[in-house]
Image (cartoon, grey):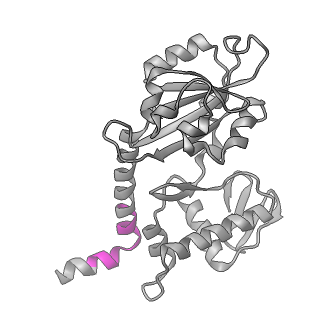
Amino acid sequence: MLVYNKLAVDPNSCAVTYDGKIVRLHPKEYRLLRLFLKYPNHVLSYDVIIDSLWDDDNIPTHGGVRAHIKGLRKALREADATEIIIETVHGLGYRLNPLNNQSSMIGTISPPVSVLKDFIKAKSIEYLVIDTNLIIKAISPGVLNYSDYPKMIKIGSPLQEGFPEFIGLEDSLLKVIQKESKSFALNGIAKAANPERPEYINFHAIADESKTFNSQQQQFLFIFFEDASENMIYRQQLVQRENEYFLLLTTPEKYLSVGNNE
């Protein structure tokens, strides 16, 4: 039995359940889910997925793989799975969502502003503060370096003008401000090419629990920005090497035959 949180797969009967409810999958979706469960700590690229699930005479396009991922996610939702089980790692592939098995540190604490300032200084993280209308109320000087439109970032301006990345995420941010969610984060966001700015950024949003910005009983949100360029480049190199080792381990005859032909 393969188990991941509330999800369970019986390899003998090929039965899949989520919290006891049957998940109805097509054969390829079932094999895809088995692959993710077999390698829960791996980011699986398109090439790894294709090499594992298709033969050389029937190789799909990347769009075909995405269609099967979409079908798998839909089947899980129809079984009342509210959590994100299959996570997209932009530019790399897909994986089981690791956040389902562990709590996010930034989402489980509510530190005072003095502690946050020390943390920001130590980690070289910049921040801004917004209100319930997503209007910028405070910024750190270096936050301009994280935007493709730094001239649009100023006190009293809408968040989305300086950071279009937040368009469509308004409801998620408001849930954090209103304490319906503990935090919200996105990692590895690719930015427009600019030698003066990070190539990739992470951002974390948490509600302000202190009195610094709440003196008038208003609700505010901290959004922290972190340069993730070095980490993302390292991860891409690491995933590429893992995929190469994975292919060598799972299809040794294929590589041996190539070596012999040479």
In this view of the protein, which residue sits in the foreground, 248 or 43? 43
Residue appearing at x 25%, y 79% in the figure:
258
Q: Which residues are magenta?
A: 245-256
Q: Is residue 75 left or right of residue 256?
A: right
Q: Position of residue 203 (x, y in %)?
A: 54, 36
Q: Position of residue 110 (x, y in %)?
A: 67, 21
Residue appearing at x 48%, y 86% in the figure:
58
Q: Is residue 126 left or right of residue 205?
A: left
In this view of the protein, which residue sits in the foreground, 198 or 164? 164
Q: Is residue 242 magenta?
A: no
In this view of the protein, which residue sits in the foreground, 70 or 253? 70
Q: Quadrant of the C terminus?
A: bottom left
Q: Quadrant of the N terminus?
A: bottom right
Q: Residue furthest bottom?
A: 57
What type of secondary structure mainly makes up the magenta span? helix
Residue appearing at x 72%, y 75% in the figure:
13
Q: Position of residue 146 (x, y in %)?
A: 45, 35
Q: Is residue 34 left or right of residue 77?
A: left
Rendered position, 111 above or below 173: above
- Where on the picture, by quarter, is residue 179? top right
